[in-house]
Amino acid sequence: MFDIIIRSALDIVGRSERLIEAMRRLLLSDGLDEVEVYELDYEIERLGDVVFNVDEAVRSLARTLECWPQTALAHEIRRTLH
């Protein structure tokens, strides 16, 4: 279950990064007026921040899950968690 969540979240991060790059290329094409450029640039920065935070959170979750079996055994947690 967690593997699916982690893979899906990392896929979303990758797609978002590609979207950010496409939007940056659009900004460089000079097809937008000054207000549209400013708004798009602002949204790119916000999306970039969110993607970075999601990426860090997912990787942290993955590291935590890698350590879970050792932690459970060390603390003698032997039941199934739901």
Image: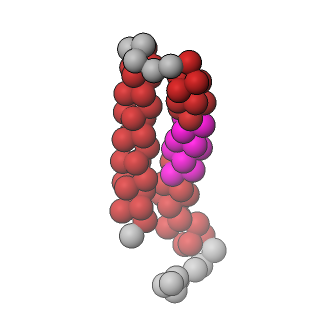
Instruction: Decide: is 4 above or below 17.
Output: below
Q: How is the image coloured?
A: secondary structure
Nearer-the-camera pick, 58 or 72:
58
Residue at image position (37%, 33%) is 18
Q: At 50% across and 61% down in the image, what residue appears?
A: 65
Q: Position of residue 43 (x, y in %)?
A: 56, 35
Quarter occupied by residue 30: top left
State whether residue 31 is above or below residue 2. above
Q: Residue at x 40, y 18 (%)?
A: 31
Residue 74 seen in this snapshot: yes
The location of residue 59, given as percent across then percent down, is 51, 48
Residue 45, can we see it?
no
Can you give x and y, in whole percent of width and height, for residue 51 in the image?
Answer: 52, 41
Position of 20 relative to 62 (above/below): above
Image coordinates for residue 12, horizontal then vertical, percent: 40, 48
Q: Quadrant of residue 29?
A: top left
Q: Main secondary structure of the magenta part?
A: helix
Q: Is residue 23 left or right of residue 46?
A: left
Q: Is residue 31 left or right of residue 71?
A: left
- Which residue is at a point 58% across and 80% down the rendered structure image? 77
Q: Which one is nearer the viewer's eye here, 25 or 12? A: 25
For this orientation, the residue located farthest to the right is 75
Q: Which residues are magenta?
A: 45-58
Q: Magenta stretch: residue 53 in it? A: yes
Q: Judge left or right: residue 44 versus residue 27.
A: right
Q: Is residue 24 magenta?
A: no
Q: Quadrant of the N terminus?
A: bottom left
Nearest the viewer among 46 and 14 is: 46
